[in-house]
Image (tube, coloured by chain):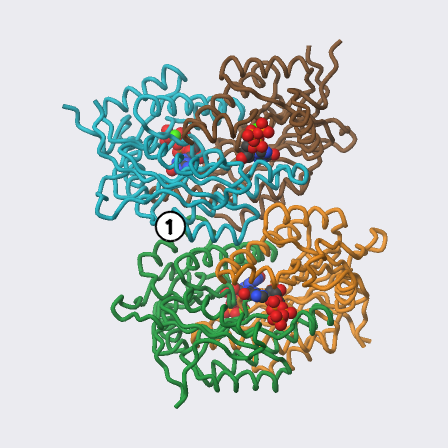
Chain colours: A cyan, B brown, C orange, D green
Amino acid sequence: MDVSVTNAQVTLVQLDNYGPWTVTPEPRREADLQTMQSRLYADLSQFFGTRDGYVFFTRFDNMIAVTNGIDRAAHARLQESLRNRYPVTVSLGIGAGANPADALVDATAHLQAAGSAQDAERREVLAGDPLDDDERTDDDVHIAHFDVNDATGKYTDELDAFSTFVRIEQGYASLMRALHDDHDGLAFFVGGDNVIALVPELARETYEAVIERVREEADMSLKVGVGAGRTATDAGMAAKHALEVCREDATTVEGDVAIRN
Amino acid sequence: MDVSVTNAQVTLVQLDNYGPWTVTPEPRREADLQTMQSRLYADLSQFFGTRDGYVFFTRFDNMIAVTNGIDRAAHARLQESLRNRYPVTVSLGIGAGANPADALVDATAHLQAAGSAQDAERREVLAGDPLDDDERTDDDVHIAHFDVNDATGKYTDELDAFSTFVRIEQGYASLMRALHDDHDGLAFFVGGDNVIALVPELARETYEAVIERVREEADMSLKVGVGAGRTATDAGMAAKHALEVCREDATTVEGDVAIRN
Amino acid sequence: MDVSVTNAQVTLVQLDNYGPWTVTPEPRREADLQTMQSRLYADLSQFFGTRDGYVFFTRFDNMIAVTNGIDRAAHARLQESLRNRYPVTVSLGIGAGANPADALVDATAHLQAAGSAQDAERREVLAGDPLDDDERTDDDVHIAHFDVNDATGKYTDELDAFSTFVRIEQGYASLMRALHDDHDGLAFFVGGDNVIALVPELARETYEAVIERVREEADMSLKVGVGAGRTATDAGMAAKHALEVCREDATTVEGDVAIRN
Amino acid sequence: MDVSVTNAQVTLVQLDNYGPWTVTPEPRREADLQTMQSRLYADLSQFFGTRDGYVFFTRFDNMIAVTNGIDRAAHARLQESLRNRYPVTVSLGIGAGANPADALVDATAHLQAAGSAQDAERREVLAGDPLDDDERTDDDVHIAHFDVNDATGKYTDELDAFSTFVRIEQGYASLMRALHDDHDGLAFFVGGDNVIALVPELARETYEAVIERVREEADMSLKVGVGAGRTATDAGMAAKHALEVCREDATTVEGDVAIRN
Ligand SMILES: Nc1nc2c(ncn2[C@@H]2O[C@H](COP(=O)(O)OP(=O)(O)OP(=O)(O)O)[C@@H](O)[C@H]2O)c(=O)[nH]1
Ligand SMILES: Nc1nc2c(ncn2[C@@H]2O[C@H](COP(=O)(O)OP(=O)(O)OP(=O)(O)O)[C@@H](O)[C@H]2O)c(=O)[nH]1
Ligand SMILES: Nc1nc2c(ncn2[C@@H]2O[C@H](COP(=O)(O)OP(=O)(O)OP(=O)(O)O)[C@@H](O)[C@H]2O)c(=O)[nH]1
Ligand SMILES: Nc1nc2c(ncn2[C@@H]2O[C@H](COP(=O)(O)OP(=O)(O)OP(=O)(O)O)[C@@H](O)[C@H]2O)c(=O)[nH]1
Ligand SMILES: [Ca+2]
Ligand SMILES: [Ca+2]
Ligand SMILES: [Ca+2]
Ligand SMILES: [Ca+2]
């Protein structure tokens, strides 16, 4: 069985009433929406990232952040900063839980309780509570960084760009489901051939089984580096270093995995 | 049979030797990479978008643009602008074809012929040729804008944020494959519950069948607006307006579809 | 006498009703305003700059651009792009004239005729006319790029940072007045120790006299490269190359200066 | 006499070896430099600003920040974030002092001691020490926010845009010198008709005399709001609110001024 000692704090970032805005008074040019969405995401990544958090673009109108160590005041300051610089505003739901999936259920519930994502009256909700400092430990956050073996040689330099993309997406879909359905992990595509997952503590055998499943379902060969830490950055950097060990030693799973007993 | 009269010009944007850069001299913080990637994508979207093109983030290290009407000099100017402002450079492959998939095969081939994506010597390639002005017509570009029916009520306000995301991704995966495998179309997730596809001219029945397939495979209900035009913006705005007609009239397919005979 | 054959097209970019916005409902944080203003300026610089124009930050709520070759449709597209991504909108006045100062008087007059800069009803004005294509010639734009000799050795590495700044500002103030009052030129500080001026065609002796005046008034030693071209970029790059000649040959004035007779 | 109880912490941000970079291998397009500089400044403003600091663009290659409460680790994180996203790097000198001018002398000295601003070997210096937490008090930072009376009616709507700019610059030059030469204050133009100054504690009569001097030297009528606080944001927001009191009551000096005795 998976041993779950993690304590992830997750923030759901939701653009307020964004759908109607995109078509009022008439449809806005897609390129402008894309520019605006990616700038806003970049600002979130700079904000959370320099506070040792991570944020994933997810659907762009709903983004998911790992925010261990980031308090309510910082969340409020972020809302203000965006309101002063963008034509849209954001609501923030903060959640915590014994595993990442539960933490996000909690974060989502706070926003849903405050009203619909497309309720014109619901604006800049800030709901849910960050972890107390004395609840926090040095391995609250577990990050698994997955990477495709030789993506350049097998896909990018071989197939046309869309076929490569389809392959990567299929691998990602398989991995995302394997981690979410069976292990309460949240996996995010971060570009290139990389997937970063917020996970509970998992055993080496679990990672091996997940990687095997992706090989079967999507015919894709992965390696993974796993890190644990007090914050997303600590865990994520440890995961990246573990991934480099995979690269050097041609191994498949490295880093902070649970010992099965 | 599908009648294919489109004449898409597609540009593949590829970061040069990006994988090695991300881990030299040691792994760079993911949040910084995310910020950099999304800023660079935003700049591309602003650049192409204000020249009536579209660009999709795809894998972020490989991005796909629809560039009808954008000449070689503009492509070169873009490379220079990025080189002067980012720590990375980009190669550009320009392709054209009787359908979007072929155009991208062509664009990709130009870059692959110049060397590997992770060849340290291959930098700022600019290869392939834009369409001649006298080859261009007023319906060279066909865009289909797909949108999930009542995503807010059925998913965003109901499920936790990751479960919604999984559902949207599954719908997208199904749609992407249906269009690519059978109709030479290139479909891109653009955020929220929206997918924009560069397509050949397709019949109403084809769209209905594609939407039916997504319903079966992914249990997701879609509508689509289709537009044709001289540029991506012309086609894309027409598609958005057609989608609004779907919304108003509760229909499933609207816009510039081929008449079957 | 100065021979004036230039034909500058100038655009005044004015944020609409910006003062009241900065204090509604109460004063907004200055750092957010600074971030927003500089991002907006960067977008303008990217937009005009990749169309061979130049834009100067000036007062940030009023910015001045050299827009030879940029038509009305591009100006309108810029307004739309900003409206879709910022919480503020811009009005644009386009002017032309036999010299830069007159061109800007014309550009300003178009906006003033449409209402006050702080009139809540006046939004997104687009007034004035770009030059006709057949009026344009290959030396419509003259740019003079001024640079302080050995600013690093004499100021940056010697004085404290504010004292250096004060010295640079004084040199700039003197230069700005010399060019504006006597030669209808518009000089803009662009960072570091650099001033870029939009000028009519001026004689070598005029530049020497201007530089002498700055030496007397502000005890600062300048060099200048001058370029002429069809667009701001053409003229500006020629000016930069001329400045490099000054650097290599230890001269004071190089480039496209008028021959006196 | 001025009573000086402030305790400003100031950071000098200096681009490393930037001059040579701008012309290597040949001069880079000015619009790209402007875009890059203003994006970098925006990132600094977002970074310091959401940590209750202020940063001023000054010369863009040398920027001055008020950083009370921001520690060394945050400064180092900023350097890393910029290195990962820009083609240039920054050195940071941190200084403190009994008045703003002295603090900046200290900050500058740290960088100058490490080498020339245009020494190719000197990169990413981080020198000087933040204030100890137990040295800090609730009125360490004093900010004076100056604003021109009716700039819209008297200048923007009346004169051409460059003449307005010349007037504003002259007012700023006079104010900058008055505060620096006689009161050890650092005044920065922040756009529009606004100047924000980092000052020691000054008496009401001092502000009145400074404003009178600007009226005489530059024929410009100012008001000022003054705030004190633990951080730049605290002091700056108090100053903005005081300025609103000036606006409402048609007064000239409001806020945290020293009582003369
Ligand atoms: N976001 C992100 N993307 C990365 C990172 N490392 C690599 N990539 C991306 O992954 C792509 C492929 O790079 P690599 O994984 O180094 O190349 P590969 O050919 O798969 O080689 P191996 O993984 O070493 O077998 C790059 O273009 C990047 O887009 C990372 O740390 N973060
Ligand atoms: N990129 C992009 N995203 C859009 C656009 N329109 C809507 N969205 C996104 O789609 C999400 C859902 O909005 P809607 O499609 O309006 O809402 P819905 O609940 O599905 O309602 P119906 O589509 O009207 O049934 C929004 O949050 C946006 O993220 C668009 O034109 N472009
Ligand atoms: N905006 C802009 N700034 C520049 C340019 N060239 C130099 N600078 C700035 O000017 C500063 C000083 O650089 P230089 O002019 O090369 O140095 P210097 O010490 O004055 O040396 P010389 O001019 O060669 O005597 C740099 O830090 C830059 O900020 C340019 O083309 N554009
Ligand atoms: N950076 C910055 N600029 C501001 C601020 N407030 C106003 N401005 C600028 O100042 C310009 C003039 O605005 P106001 O000062 O409100 O207008 P005014 O006509 O001078 O009127 P009064 O000051 O009320 O007499 C605006 O366009 C803005 O650029 C501020 O808090 N910060
Ligand atoms: Ca890989
Ligand atoms: Ca929808
Ligand atoms: Ca110089
Ligand atoms: Ca004012």
Res C146 seen here: no
A124 lies left or right of C119: left
Q: How many numbered circles are shown?
A: 1
Q: Quick one: C82 or D256, which is closer to the camera? A: D256
Question: Which one is nearer the viewer's eye here, C31 or C137?
Answer: C31
Q: Position of residue A208 (x, y in %)?
A: 27, 21
Query: Within 8 Å: ligand 1 and the Cβ of disc 1?
Result: no
Q: Amino acid at mark 1?
A: Thr
Dividing the picture into quadrants, the one containing residue B45 is top right
Q: Position of residue B128 (x, y in %)?
A: 63, 31
Image-quadrant location for residue B34: top left
Q: Residue furthest left?
A: A261
Depth check: give the residue in front, B3 or A42: A42
Q: Residue at x 59, y 59 (%)?
A: C21
Name the residue nearer the viewer: B112 or B237: B237
Q: Is residue C116 left or right of residue B77?
A: right
Q: With D261 as the anchor, is D170 left or right in this view?
A: right
Quarter, ligand 6: top right
Q: Compared to A69, does C54 lie above or below?
A: below
Q: Is residue C214 above or below residue B213?
A: below
Left or right relative to A246: residue A165: right
Residue ID at (65%, 27%): B247
State the SS at label 1.
Answer: loop
Q: Which residue is mark 1?
A: A50
- Does C144 appear above or below A257? below
Q: Where's the C terminus of chain A, which quadrant?
A: top left
